Amino acid sequence: MIFVNLPVQSLQRSTDFWSALGFSFNPQFTDENATCLVIDEDHIYAMLLVPDFFQTFTSRQIADTATTIESMIALSAESREAVDTMADAALANGGSPAGDAQDFGYMYGRSFLDPDGHHWDVTWMDLNAAPAG
């Protein structure tokens, strides 16, 4: 399993945002300090933590996502249309664009920043059409 831990200013705002994109949460790991975003059941989760709680896990300063990128998290989509659906939903629910769409024919992706400034890529790829490496 993979757990990505991200600081968020408002658990409710984050829950509303990701719910609008069709994601669910694991209530077993949700309280006033954190919520567990289910990205891929039994495999990938994002723990969304309020800053004070996030800070208990590190002595380093939390990145200011208004001016600094901390990571780029990529999500796979099943089709080009699914990429557009998720990116459009993100933008309609408090996200902002993080760059232009990229279309390589066999691969298509769009990027957005969630309401806390975390960078997310949504990508579809036709592996059968990808160039040989």
Image (cartoon, rainbow, N blue to C red):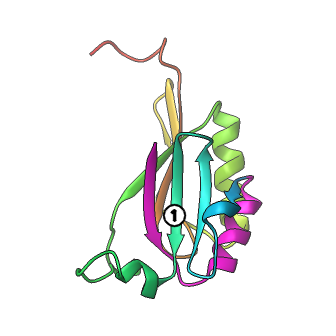
Q: How far from the left and from the top, in percent, is residue 64?
A: 36, 82
Q: Which residue lies under the disc numbered 1?
A: 47
Q: Which of 32/75 is in front?
A: 32
- SS for tag 1? strand
On whether residue 14 falls in the magenta region, the answer is yes
Q: At 36% across and 82% down in the image, what residue appears?
A: 55
On whether residue 110 falls in the magenta region, the answer is no
User: 75 left or right of 58?
Assistant: right
Q: Amino acid at mark 1?
A: Met
Residue sitting farthest toward the left: 60
Q: Which of 121/56 is in front?
A: 56
* Vertical comparison of 61 with 45: above or below: below
Q: At 35% across and 81% down in the image, what residue appears?
A: 56
* Vertical comparison of 6 with 74: above or below: below
Q: At 60% across and 37% down in the image, what residue appears?
A: 77
Q: Is residue 110 visible?
A: no
Q: Which of 52/88 is in front?
A: 52
Q: How far from the left and from the top, in percent, is residue 106?
A: 49, 23
Q: Which of 87/36 is in front?
A: 36
Other-residue count near label 1 (Cα within 10 Å), few / some / many at <14 / 14–19 / ≥20:
many
* Vertical comparison of 37 with 116: above or below: above
User: 96 left or right of 68?
Assistant: right
Residue sitting farthest toward the front: 28
Q: Is residue 6 visible?
A: yes
* Vertical comparison of 21 with 101: above or below: below
Q: How far from the left and from the top, in percent, is residue 43?
A: 53, 40
Image quadrant assignment for residue 62: bottom left
User: 63 left or right of 125?
Assistant: left
Q: Which residues are magenta?
A: 1-22
Image quadrant assignment for residue 12: bottom right
